[in-house]
Amino acid sequence: MDDANTPATGHASSVPHVLVAEDHPVNRVVAQAMLASLGVSCTLAEDGEEAVQCAATVEVDLILMDLHMPGLDGLEATRQLRAQAAAAGRARVPVVAMTGGDEAQDGPACLAAGMDGFLAKPFTVEALKDCLRRHGVPCTAG
């Protein structure tokens, strides 16, 4: 896990915080830079299993979840996140699918797994900003 700007116990400040689950190292760095440009801190997870572990210990406002990761993919990771939060009595954190696939094709499976939205890759800072705002995460102009 690459923990950027936040200790494992939760928010270090009132800065919005996003968990990014992405197996491709360049995509993780790009997402982190885009989020930083919008005034949002993030924690990076390299796969679905790590994302589930992070979500249990790091307080986040939103989870950006790659669909296609080795091992635990984004759909199964989301199912586990939903079960974990329900068992612990935690609030539902929005999970947005990130994929190079098509929303018409992947969208139904994403919704069935408990995801709340879809962000097509590659995405722009503007698309990311719109996604954040749509899910109640405040950000700067970018």
Image (cartoon, rainbow, N blue to C red):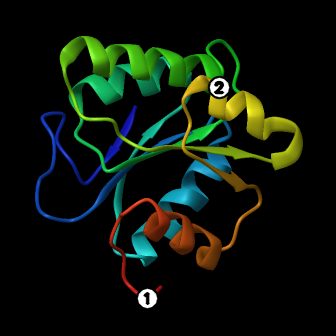
The CA span between labels 2 and 1 is 33 Å
Q: Please give left or right for residue 16 compared with residue 42 in the image.
A: left
- Looking at the rendered image, the quarter that the N terminus falls into is top left
Name the residue rendered at 61%, 79% in the picture. 126
Q: Nearer the viewer, residue 133 or 43?
A: 133
Q: Nearer the viewer, residue 85 or 98?
A: 85
- Please say if 128 is above or below 112: below
Q: Please give left or right for residue 29 compared with residue 88 in the image.
A: right
Location of mark 1 (residue): 141
In the rendering, at what x and y percent does residue 6 appear? 21, 48
Name the residue rendered at 60%, 24% in the picture. 113
Location of mark 2 (residue): 112
The amino acid type, in three-letter code, at marker 2 is Ala
Mark toward the viewer: 2 or 1: 2
**Which secondary structure lies at badge 1?**
loop
In the rendering, at what x and y percent does residue 15 appear? 21, 65
